């Protein structure tokens, strides 16, 4: 195995020499602009994701404000469409994905006993191009004619024939996001492959590392497809090609196939690292080893492979032959098996454990319950005949917000509370955290649960107005949305408070925590594992 | 670092290959639809009428739709809107096309059959859609379509809708006429 066991003496010499040089980090803004340190870059990613979370959230507030009552009150339909579109793009590419990349940067080197990421300079690049991508996207909202308004799925011909000139900026910003993700993913794979400490063999890696390793492979396989797709949209719109234009022999349905070939693995990109986080938190607070480690690894890999075979379940209503719909229906349902393995493993880990309920554990528990609800509505959507009723209704909106907000976002919040003492050296305010949790839990269900009902009753998504009978539920949903947004201010308050000071954390932080990251002091020094640790 | 380079190279190769794969999906999709007859794409080559067995036991309704694309100024419509046929019978159907503008326009009709799975069984012996059609300013013409429905058409199909969309391809046509002066009009 090609781990970093080579020439320990040489390494030590180099390390002694570099030590003085490295700790001499530039101060102020230059530290952050030029940094190649995985912890600094992780922090940058996480702060960026938090800012994007609030920007995307404020767009959701515009949507919910308009939908508070039936009829048109506050915004033009065209602006409403821009809000749904950019809200989706910001939350997927600006909040959830960078937050996971930030966690990967911070934790993966510490979890596998590596001194840093394998490609530190590329790491700096992959973060610093990201703000520009989103600056371009957000500024396009102020163009004459407005920003992208075709939904985050940018189906042709909405994005080709019927879009305005902000589409060029949209395409360019997606290209930059894609390059950033691909560079980040390559970095993660190379780090995990080559830089594990001696003795850290594959089946000893923490599950967060495993899930990110598999996620990174998904990223390098589907982000290029997305890049190709937006390029086709660009050339169709401006350079006279007709990939999706029937007038030139193209086909708009082809767009949907290529989009969802990217899009379905993409949703697992946004949930697999969450599985890794929950698999780290549950054993700590249940004070038991994770039940079924190997089956967790295999389940993650099977979900990743299956994710490439189910894309057309987003397109049942385009009119596929019965054989194809059956294939995609059964393949989709098959994903419930490895996902079920994971959920049962988490439950079995807690069985007869000595559990305590600190904030990370609370968010992880809420994740298990609420993500499972999202999984169940996903199973309902997988049933082809039923999908004809649910397609493009609020039921779909409810489904993917359960898996993405109470799934991915809750897991990210859990991870932040879990590792915050390691990052800052201070314990967060437990009472404030509990307030944050309970306010979020109640409001998020008030926000998303009634969406199931209005969806089943036929309320279509992405429409700024609705029939009168949906009025009460929509008022509830909007109030839930506002409360959920306000609850996240408690989170920010807690983060700032913890960064400023508080009860000093021990190295292990949590009584039941195991793993290399808990063996370094809190806060984690700027450089960790300059000499690889020995794993028994 | 050397071991990194090798792995990074391979990973970039995967990335590039997947970028290429995205584009490869375009022709692959066309071939897939052609082979399976999915998506309502009819064959672009003429069928032969060897199969002369006429199945009089059932009748299939054929609906004809025709529309010019929004950039195409021709008037374009079928002679009748529906026709009942027995599988195996050969029929001729005419489409009316008129160019009301002041200049010559070349048109190309693109067919689409619904339900898509019936496309494989809708055979065209002769069709104006196999080639580009020219109309001088103010002229009109009847464009013929000769077809039969394959008797092997599965029993669940009772109605087949054939839709033609007509596109203006004058520019593309002009680009393919290198020595237009020599040919003359």
Image (cartoon, rainbow, N blue to C red):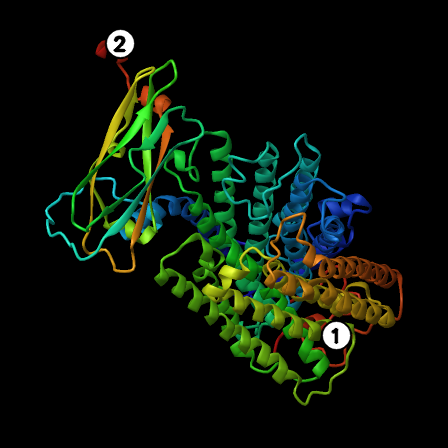
Q: Is mark 1 on a helix, strand or loop?
A: helix
Residue on which disc 1 sits: A362
Image spot of residue B32 (x, y percent): 32, 50
Image spot of residue A147 (x, y percent): 65, 37
In this view, the residue farthest toward the bottom is: A352
Quarter of the image where the N terminus of chain B is located = bottom right
Q: In this view, does A57 lie above or below B162?
A: below
Residue on which disc 2 sits: B181
Q: In this view, does B71 lie above or below B55?
A: above
Quarter of the image where the C terminus of chain B is located = top left
Mark 2–mark 1 CB contact (< 8 Å): no
Q: Mark 2 vs mark 1: give the one in front.
A: 2
- Where is residue A331, by image quadrant? bottom left
Instruction: Tell whether B177 sits left or right of A313.
Output: left
Judging depth in this view, the residue of B54 and A45 nearest the camera is B54
Q: Is residue A135 above or below residue A532?
A: above
Instruction: Tell whether A173 sits left or right of B6.
Output: right
Q: Is mark 2 on a helix, strand or loop?
A: helix
- Where is residue A267, by image quadrant? bottom right
Judging depth in this view, the residue of A220 and A78 nearest the camera is A78
Q: How far apart are marks 2 and 1 (CA)?
A: 81 Å
From this viewpoint, is residue B122 visible?
yes
Chain letter for the residue marked with disc 2 in the picture? B
Judging depth in this view, the residue of B46 and B19 nearest the camera is B46
Q: In this view, does B74 lie above or below A7?
A: above
Image spot of residue A527 (x, y percent): 72, 60
Q: Give the number of callouts.
A: 2
Instruction: Tell whether A57 sits left or right of B170.
Output: right
Judging depth in this view, the residue of A440 and A218 nearest the camera is A440
Residue at the (70%, 83%) spot, across then down? A286
Image spot of residue A39 (x, y percent): 72, 58
């Amino acid at each position: 195995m090609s781990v970093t066991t080579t020439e320990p003496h040489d390494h030590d010499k180099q390390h002694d020499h570099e030590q003085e040089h490295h700790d001499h980090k530039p101060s102020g803004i230059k530290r952050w602009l030029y940094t190649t340190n995985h912890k600094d870059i992780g922090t940058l990613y996480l702060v960026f994701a938090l800012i994007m979370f609030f920007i995307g959230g404020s767009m959701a507030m515009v949507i919910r404000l308009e939908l508070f009552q039936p009829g048109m009150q506050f915004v033009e339909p065209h602006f409403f469409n821009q809000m749904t579109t950019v809200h989706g793009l910001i939350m997927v590419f600006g909040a959830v994905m960078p937050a996971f990349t930030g966690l990967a940067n911070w934790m993966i080197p510490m979890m596998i006993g590596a001194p840093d990421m394998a490609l530190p300079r590329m790491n700096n690049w992959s973060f610093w191009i990201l703000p520009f991508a989103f600056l371009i996207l957000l500024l396009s909202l102020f163009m004459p004619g407005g920003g992208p308004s075709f939904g985050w799925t940018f189906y042709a011909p909405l994005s080709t024939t019927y879009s305005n000139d902000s589409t060029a900026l949209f395409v360019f910003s997606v290209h930059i996001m894609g390059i950033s993700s691909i560079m980040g993913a390559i970095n993660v794979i190379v780090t995990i492959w080559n830089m594990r400490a001696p003795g850290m063999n594959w089946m000893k890696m923490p599950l967060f590392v495993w899930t990110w390793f598999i996620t990174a492979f998904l990223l390098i396989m589907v982000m290029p497809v997305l890049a190709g797709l937006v390029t086709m949209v660009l050339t169709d719109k401006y350079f006279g090609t007709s990939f999706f234009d029937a007038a030139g022999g193209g086909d708009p349905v082809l767009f949907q196939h290529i989009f969802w070939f990217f899009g379905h693995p993409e949703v697992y990109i946004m949930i697999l690292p969450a599985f890794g986080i929950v698999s780290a938190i549950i054993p700590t607070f249940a004070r038991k080893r994770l039940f079924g480690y190997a089956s967790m690894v295999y389940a993650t890999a099977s979900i990743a492979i299956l994710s490439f075979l189910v894309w057309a379940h987003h397109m049942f209503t385009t009119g596929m032959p019965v054989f194809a719909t059956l294939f995609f229906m059964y393949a989709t349902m098959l994903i419930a098996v490895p996902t079920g393995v994971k959920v049962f493993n988490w439950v079995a880990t807690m069985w007869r454990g000595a559990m305590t309920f600190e904030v990370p554990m609370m968010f992880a528990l809420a994740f298990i319950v609420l993500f499972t609800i999202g999984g169940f509505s996903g199973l309902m959507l997988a049933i082809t005949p039923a999908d004809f009723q649910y397609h493009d209704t609020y039921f779909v909106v409810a489904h993917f917000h359960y898996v993405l907000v109470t799934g991915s976002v809750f897991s990210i919040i859990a991870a932040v509370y879990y590792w915050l003492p390691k990052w800052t050296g201070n314990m967060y305010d437990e009472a404030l955290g509990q307030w944050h949790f309970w306010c979020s839990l109640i409001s998020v269900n008030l926000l998303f649960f009634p969406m199931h009902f209005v969806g089943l009753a036929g309320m279509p998504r992405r429409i700024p107005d609705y029939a009168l009978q949906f009025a009460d539920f929509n008022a509830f949903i909007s109030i839930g949305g506002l409360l959920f947004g306000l609850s996240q201010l408690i989170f920010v308050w807690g983060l700032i408070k913890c960064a400023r000071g508080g009860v000093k954390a021990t190295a292990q932080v949590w009584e039941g925590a195991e793993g290399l990251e808990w063996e370094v002091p809190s806060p984690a020094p700027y450089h960790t594992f300059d000499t690889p640790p020995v794993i028994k | 670092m050397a071991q990194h380079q090798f792995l990074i190279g391979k990973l970039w190769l995967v990335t590039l290959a997947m970028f290429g794969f995205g584009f490869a999906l375009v022709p692959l999709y066309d071939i897939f639809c052609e082979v399976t007859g999915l998506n309502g794409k009819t064959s672009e080559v003429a069928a032969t009428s060897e199969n002369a067995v006429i199945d009089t036991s059932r009748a299939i309704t054929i609906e004809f739709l025709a529309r010019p694309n929004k950039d195409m100024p021709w008037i374009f419509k079928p002679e009748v809107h529906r026709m009942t046929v027995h599988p195996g019978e050969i029929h001729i159907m005419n489409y009316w096309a008129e160019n009301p503008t002041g200049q010559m326009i070349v048109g190309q009709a693109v067919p689409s059959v619904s339900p898509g799975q019936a496309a494989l069984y809708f055979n065209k012996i002769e069709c104006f859609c196999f080639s580009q059609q020219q109309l001088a300013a103010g002229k009109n013409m009847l464009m013929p379509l000769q077809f039969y429905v394959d008797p092997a058409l599965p029993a669940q199909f009772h109605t087949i809708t054939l839709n033609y969309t007509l596109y203006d391809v004058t520019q593309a046509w002009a680009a393919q006429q290198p020595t237009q002066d020599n040919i003359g009009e």
